[in-house]
Amino acid sequence: MRNEKIKEMTYIASYVAIYVVLWWVGKFIPFLQMPQGGSIEIELISIFIASYHLGYKKGILVAILCWLITFILGSGRWYLNPMQYSLDYFIPLIVVGLASLFWKGEKRYYIGVIISMLLKFISNVLSGVYYWPPEGGAAGSIPAWIYSLSYNSGYNIATLIVALILVPLLIQRLKKINISFIN
């Protein structure tokens, strides 16, 4: 039993470390970055795989630890108030950690990634509508909705595509080295 706990803690630490490394590397790849915040988030792959490997509860734990470490390292520079911060940074990671909860069956990896990314997108859009309206626009206005939907869709769709390709591929490879995933 003790060995299982140690193994689980090691996996959690590994997923967090992979997330932080990918987050850091992503900052140095210019085409991944959006001009006014947001990016193609290759680091989310780590949380998706953690959720499918360890379950959604541990996936949430990994997401919280990822948020905490990247917060300490300087993520979240765009802070207006706790609600905006939650919509931009905290909630999106939590919903990615929930990926394994959304669907059971053969297509689970695809459905979980799609639903998680949709919820992440909604959170990002709401933040944009109410806290980052376009210049000359009011929070909650139609121009704010249009701007936020168009701005956030670009990098979220790109992240979705990357995740839809890499998550099932990496899980398939990890299964070949006898790492078990939840059913």
Image: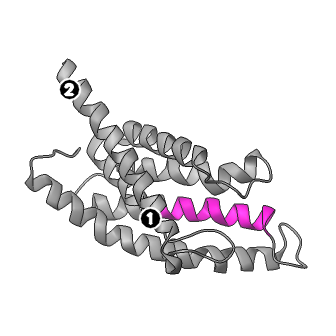
What residue lies at 23% left-to-right and 44% top-to-bottom?
182
- Which residue does the numbered mark 1 point to in the structure image? 25
Is 82 displayed left or right of 16 in the figure? right
Is 179 displayed left or right of 97 in the figure? left
What residue lies at 55% left-to-right and 41% top-to-bottom?
68
Q: Where is residue 20 in the image (x, y as percent from the top left)?
A: 44, 52
Q: Which amino acid does label 2 sit on?
A: Glu
Q: Assign a secondary structure to mark 2.
A: helix
Q: Do the residues labelled 2 and 1 touch (CB within 8 Å)?
A: no
* Residue range highlighted in magenta: 117-132
| Rendered position, 51 above or below 129 | above
Q: Position of residue 174 (x, y in %)?
A: 16, 54
Q: Assign a secondary structure to mark 1.
A: helix
- Which residue does the numbered mark 2 point to in the structure image? 4
Characterize the magenta stretch by its predominant secondary structure.
helix
- Mark 2–mark 1 Cα distance, whole angstroms, equals 31 Å
